Amino acid sequence: MSADTPDTPDLTPMTDEGPALDLGPVPSVPAAAPSAVTPYRVLARKYRPQTFADLIGQEAMVRTLSNAFTSGRIAQAYILTGVRGVGKTTTARILARALNYEPADGPVGGGAPTLDMPGLGRHCRDIIESRHVDVQEMDAASNTGIGDIREIIEAARYKPVLARYKVFIIDEVHMLSTAAFNGLLKTLEEPPEHVKFIFATTEIRKVPVTVLSRTQRFDLRRVEAGTLARHLHGICTAEGVNIDAEALSLIARAAEGSVRDALSLLDQAIAHSGGQTAADASGGMVHGEQVRALLGLADRGRVIDLFEALMKGDIAQALTELREQYDSGADPAVVIADLAEFTHLVTRMKILPETGDDAALVEAERTRGRDFARGLSMRVLARAWQMLTKGLAEVQQAAKPMQAAEMVLVRLAYASDLPTPDEALRRLRDGAPDAPAARPAGGAPMSGSSGGGSGGGSAMAATAPRSYAAPAAAPSAAPSAASHLSVAARSAPRPAGPSVAPAPAVAAGVAVATYEDLVALAASKRDLRLKFALENNIRLVSFEDGQMEVALAPGGAPNLIQEIQSKLSEWTGRRWLVALSREEGEPTLADKAAAQRDAMMTGVRADPLVAAALARFPGASIVDVRTLTTEEPAGGFTADADMTDADLMAARDDGPGADDDLEF
């Protein structure tokens, strides 16, 4: 640089690689976030089981595999089936770990296959993360062809690189093509000793039987709601999340036995409610109301209130309650389904009282369900269940679900005032007067009625306690009306009209002294199918009053014995015992009738008159033989009392006269 050149800053400072452009002073940059912060992992992945001890609800499978590994009876192929989210793929990876487990501090290649894995072994981390060279996972949904199976067959020829076994895990195996299944059969049946196959599928019926016969099948069960709720509670405790028992119960039920669905819903519920966690202590508790709002469910307590109104016949209260739940965001179809579910719960509590001890039940379901189980008859519950299940399909298919749901509730509320079939028959048999008709509208009297008797019904409906023991019958009600919770007012009298004779009820105490009486009774009841079975398929061994012992003829239905017993008890009004015997028994009535007919035919052919008639008319044959009653013979012919066989033979030889009428 010459002296005439003014001094200017040098913009090309030297670096190790040569001159570089000077961009001026470096601006201050804020410190970067620490790289130690890891991205959030959803609960379903974070708490995926690592050992068989972590699996919940699959005790039968774990016990079988544990015994097999202990005794060294390890199969060459396993197939795991079950609904979504019960742990099929997770179990496959744990099984691959167990097959290749080697203690980390032990010698290379040491140990043996075991389900007892106290810590991570030499190959465990790579197998868990699906990056072990000897454990290959293939998704059959995207690799369905025979070419993919050829790669597996080719890889199976070579021994494992690091582990004890080369394990092939094929998920959604039912998606393989027919050619792929056929190509796998030979290797699956006789694989090399160092190869193991583990299949997982949700559609076990789509897997060919030729594949099923070459594998050991394990059906992974749905996890019970109580077990799932306890599992979720443990995870919330580990995560530092505050959640109430009702929210856990709702999530466990909505998951329908799927652990993955339950954890996904729990993740969503925590995010929805801002639940308190270890990372964020500013949130609050996850409540059941928030979970119901998230899932679009109705309040369980309000569903029980709706059920109570329906069983009382209070249709006005029921429609009001349904509208309030609908305005709160509940789906009408979900409300009807919840009613059906609660009806099923009450029925189970009536049959199995220990059902109320289920941990998945909320307190309202447990206490009020037991009260309903004591107060409602089985026939009322069965009728409500049938109407709700049929109504649910109507609501789901209706253009306006809310209107369809209201009509379902109207039918159910009105049906609660109707007597059950046995009660109606009892009233007809006993001559009890019919209860006065009423509109189940919360005790309000119908128009035109005096209202003199309406106060008791509405007061009882309004102030009914939570205990539903059968109340004493009101004076205006029928004697059997207290068998369920129909307490709506019955204020309007029946309109006067012509009396209609009631249909004849089944007569109680019908005597059945012999087996032939039973056949005649079936004929009188117009049960022709049972009559035919009694005549052709039953061999009688013994018959006594109230019980009989029979044997089935060839072609008899296996359920015929139970049908005969139930029909006998129904028709006679008594309990009958029908037992199936090992003895051969008598011939059937049809066989007896055929033998009697053959004997009569033989005797008739030996009769001289019949033989002469057959000889007189060539080509004639005996079609049937019937026993004559005391009726007058056809044609008005009456034989004289003193007419002998010789006289009859002579009349036959003379033939018909000119004045005789021949009738064919």
Image: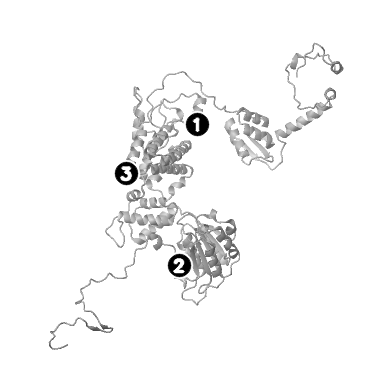
Q: CA distance from mark 2 to mark 1?
A: 63 Å
- Three-letter amino acid code of the residue under disc 2: Ser
Residue 266 locus on image (x, y percent): 37, 55
Q: Earlier in the sequence, mark 3 or mark 2?
A: 2
For residue 421, the mark is 1
Frontmost residue, 610 versus 630: 610
- Eye-nearest disc, 3 or 2: 2
For residue 485, say whether it is visible: no
Residue beneath disc 3: 328
Residue 220 locus on image (x, y percent): 50, 56
Q: CA distance from mark 1 to mark 3?
A: 38 Å
- Three-letter amino acid code of the residue under disc 1: Pro
Image check: 423 left or right of 289? right
Task: Tell me the residue at 78%/31% (across/down).
Answer: 598
For residue 130, the mark is 2
Q: Say which quarter of the image contains residue 551.
A: top right
Q: Residue furthest top?
A: 659
Secondary element at image label 2: loop
